Image (tube, grey):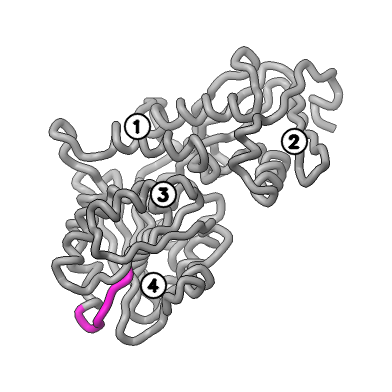
Amino acid sequence: MSKSQQNPICHTAQPSAEFYSIFSDAEILDILQTLANRREISLKYFYKGQGANIWDNFYLNYLRPRWYRPVNREIALLNDNFEVITRKIHAVNTVNLIDVGAGNSYPVKQFIRRLHRLGKITRYIALDISEDLLKVSQQNIKKWFPHIEFISDRIDIENHSLSQILLNHQVNLKTDDTAQIILHLGVTMGNHHNRTAVLQNFRDSMGYNDVLVFTNEIGSNCQWDGTVRGGLKYHVDQVYAWVKKAMGIRAEDCELVRKYDPKTDSIVAMIKFRQNYRINFRLMGEDECLEIAEGEEIAIWRQHKFEIPELVREIEQAGPQLIHYKTDNYSSNIMVICEID
């Protein structure tokens, strides 16, 4: 029995109408189960609805190259590794660029321009869990590259491979004259709860000519010095505000805690409750109750940095073949390129 069941409930909350307009019944069920089982709301859900605007604004304000911030690490790594990424496409007639977790598509703008100069890119395929971010992606790509075919669809890569979605759009992944460049950029790989499942889903979606390219931060999580900056500051602040509003949690009843989590070897942001809470969800016509005890914490954001031997080991266990990796000039981010046997 939890502490909230032993002691009287001090406050009862219910999610907002916006919450129910954003999430499907299946997603609400997953949110409930994840809250109940591991006291976490998966970060992937914070890119939907208002979360899409939060992320787009965060990227444009803090990550997009500007005159005073000329380097974006994903863009720089794509540029530095262009020849390795594209080494197979010279033997094929066409290239599909598949951007998983596409967001607003800004990180791939220069990369697409270089591919376009080679005269082989035929489609840009944007995949994301957020319909709202896919709309932003479409607006950007159509403006930048009006002659390149744009395809988009929703995907949760932790639970699904690419194959069925692309088949629905009549994209054949395994033809001899077409190569797929599959991108998974940013630090998204370190956000996933089950990274092995993600890598296996990518592996199962790839053919002989295809390459998987992903990036992430590298370093030691347990040696975090407590400095709050970047996404841990600006993105987390916005996510925290959104969660309180969406869940009906009063500001005075909780606080935001950032810390190292040894169980997952990650830096996490948590909502810590100052009193016993009950949150009443409505799911498929039935009431579902979640009780949270005073002092309990719920994770709303997490980021796992890789140490390189750990990263190599995870790739080997999941099945893709690691052919190349390179760190940025600051040795803080890494780009990984994989194929299949």
Q: Which residues are magenta?
A: 90-96
Question: 127 or 240, which is in the foreground?
Answer: 127
| Residue 317 visible (yes or no) | no
| Circle 2: residue type | Phe
Q: Residue at x 42, y 71 (%)?
A: 320
**Marks 2/4: CA distance?**
44 Å
Q: Residue at x 51, y 35 (%)?
A: 268
The crowding category of the residue bearing disc 4, from other C-alpha atoms within 10 Å (few below 14, some 14 to 19, many at least 20), is some
Residue that carries the numbered disc 4 in the rendered image: 321
Residue that carries the numbered disc 3 in the rendered image: 135
- Assess whether mark 2 and mark 1 are in contact (beta carbons under 8 angstroms): no
Q: Looking at the image, is mark 2 or mark 4 earlier in the sequence?
A: 2
Q: Residue at x 53, y 72 (%)?
A: 164
| Circle 4: residue type | Gln
Quadrant assignment, res 14: top right
Q: Is residue 290 left or right of residue 317?
A: right
**Marks 1/2: CA distance?**
33 Å
Of the two numbered discs 4 and 3 in the rendering, the one whose residue sits closer to the viewer? 3
Task: Reply yes or no: does residue 247 show up in magenta.
Answer: no
Question: 47 or 323, which is in the foreground?
Answer: 47
Give the percent coordinates (x, y) of residue 25.
69, 48
Q: Is residue 105 left or right of residue 202?
A: left
- Assess whether mark 4 and mark 2 are in contact (beta carbons under 8 angstroms): no
Task: Reply yes or no: does residue 91 show up in magenta.
Answer: yes
